[in-house]
Amino acid sequence: MTLWLADAPLVLASRSEIRRRILRDAAVPVEVAPADIDERALQARAPSADPGAVAALLAREKALAVARTRPGRLVLGADQVLAFGSRLLNKPADLDAARAQLKALRGQTHALHAAIALVRDGAVTFAHEDAARLCMREFSDGFLDAYLATAGAAVTASVGAYQLEGPGIHLFEEVEGDYFTILGLPLLPLLRHLRQAHVLAA
């Protein structure tokens, strides 16, 4: 007997390696099928500038887009938005953009809003949004150079230009919130729903 009770793996509508790893580490089999959507255009059309609502919209639209090509399958969409004051920050385009972004965040507190949506056959069966607050320490320019040299191009793969599960942890003074939310996948509410839906062993 296995923990996963469905006939087919969960479809993950994301190219995020950390989300795939989180699910597989939790014994949830995953089929990766990244959604082909214009995230920035969707964000611009969001009915609200609220970062949680934006993350929820993006997660839902990713799941719906992939579900159209996977009839009968359970599809998980996920997204994360970084709110810094009234600004929503996107993934830095390159290392120079990452450096500028980290200098702006240095010594300040920002929020990460992570949302998930489960879809089957065009219907959203579950949605959840959570937020965490992170305070960066007042690191030196020399440290920043060393951090970027250590982390490399991976800093362009996340909205904050850091991976908390890697060398990005050195950037922070204080973190408030769920660890998996910070990584971009609120895991415990998802697992609870999957158990209630009899997709996971209870």
Image (cartoon, rainbow, N blue to C red):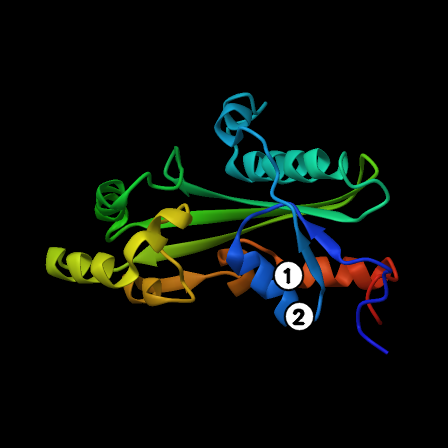
Give the left or right position of residue 185, taking residue 81 as reference.
Answer: right
Where is residue 65 shown, x and y percent of the image?
69, 33
Q: Quadrant of the N terminus?
A: bottom right
Percent x, y of residue 52:
56, 40
Q: Position of residue 76 (x, y in %)?
A: 69, 48
Q: Residues within 10 Å of mark 1 (few under 14, many from 20)?
A: some
Amino acid type assigned to the residue bearing label 2 in the image = Ala
Q: Which residue is mark 2?
A: 26
Give the secondary structure at mark 2: loop
**Residue 165 disc label:** none
Amino acid type, label 1: Leu
User: Would you say 106 lies left or right of 24 here?
Assistant: left
Specify whether residue 161 is in view.
no
Q: Residue at 24% x, 51% y: name it.
A: 106
- Placement of the C terminus among the 4 image quadrants: bottom right
Residue 87 image-quadrant placement: top left
Specify which label sits upstream in the sequence, 2 or 1. 2
Residue at position x 21%, y 42% in the image? 96
Mark 2 touching mark 1, by CB under 8 A?
yes
